[in-house]
Amino acid sequence: MSGKSLLLKVILLGDGGVGKSSLMNRYVTDRFDSQSFHTIGVEFLNRDLEMDGRLVTLQIWDTAGQERFKSLRTPFYRGADCCLLTFAVDDLQSFQNLGCWKKEFMYYSDVRDPERFPFVVLGNKVDKEEREVGEDEARAWCEENGCCPYFETSAKDDTNVGAAFEAAVRGVLASEDPTDHTLLSSSIDLHGNRKVARSSCC
Ligand SMILES: Nc1nc2c(ncn2[C@@H]2O[C@H](COP(=O)(O)OP(=O)(O)OP(=O)(O)O)[C@@H](O)[C@H]2O)c(=O)[nH]1
Ligand SMILES: [Mg+2]
């Protein structure tokens, strides 16, 4: 296994309140807060994982879904390797807005190859009894919008959260030349302090 870690930037988009911050926190810290506050602007957390013998550092960017924060979040779309479009299954409007989120991402991210860019769709809050969006309906949207993978998740119950983020990594590794990505290498200095050096391979 290579000692260098591939740095992948994934970005969580979707309406305010669908659970983006909760999904990121569940995946990175394995915690859930039933009283979480709306995000202002963007926040990010890293998680290391191993996929098919490769070390990957997943840099998860969590954005504010509320419209009033649009100008704070859009500058962070550039350089994303994958976009996780998120809605809540108990909120029809958040599902109907998926197309707008995709458009907003495409407009501001300026991706090199829009046809091949990997999206993953997450229908969150499946632990809730009352649903406004059926699984079939969500899968049909994904089929019509580039056949992106779909996951029914619950940040609360930890349902499919890891699977969704891992699908994002698989999507990136399958869609692009992985040598395009930034490599992080661990090195030891002469004084014995461990440091992380950032180096680009291209
Ligand atoms: N039942 C249930 N509640 C959830 C789930 N995920 C998030 N929530 C709750 O939904 C509310 C909003 O969650 P957030 O994670 O803050 O939503 P967000 O998408 O980050 O919202 P913005 O930051 O405004 O864009 C909080 O009260 C969470 O506790 C889930 O899977 N199930
Ligand atoms: Mg948030």
Image (cartoon, grey):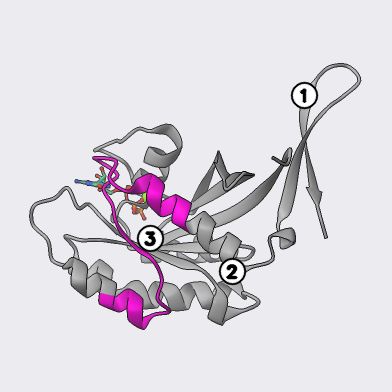
Is residue 21 among what the camera can see? no
Is residue 65 among what the camera can see? yes
**Residue 144 lies in what quarter of the image?**
bottom left
Taking the magenta stretch, the answer to whether it contains residue 130 is no
Residues packed near mark 2 inside 10 Å, few (<14), some (14 to 19) or many (20 plus): some
Residue 17 in the image: state x and y as whole percent.
28, 54
Dot 3 corresponds to which residue? 65
Residues packed near mark 3 inside 10 Å, few (<14), some (14 to 19) or many (20 plus): many
Establish whether ligand 1 lies closer than 8 Å to the Cβ of label 3: yes
Labelled disc at residue 175: 2
Judge left or right: residue 190 versus residue 17: right
| Magenta stretch, residue numbers | 140-167
Separation (CA) of disc 3 from disc 2: 27 Å
Separation (CA) of disc 2 from disc 1: 33 Å
Separation (CA) of disc 1 from disc 3: 37 Å
Establish whether ligand 1 lies closer than 8 Å to the Cβ of label 2: no
Above or below, 184 against 181 in this view is: above
Most distant residue in the left direction: 130
Residue at the image point whose x is 62% and y is 79% from the top: 113
- Going from the N terminus, do you reach mark 2 or mark 1 first? 2
Above or below, 163 against 139 in this view is: above
Judge left or right: residue 49 versus residue 135: right
**Residue 63 lies in what quarter of the image?**
bottom left
- The residue under label 3 is which amino acid type? Gly
> For the C terminus, which image quadrant?
bottom right
Secondary structure type for disc 3: loop
Dot 1 corresponds to which residue? 194
Judge left or right: residue 132 versus residue 25: left
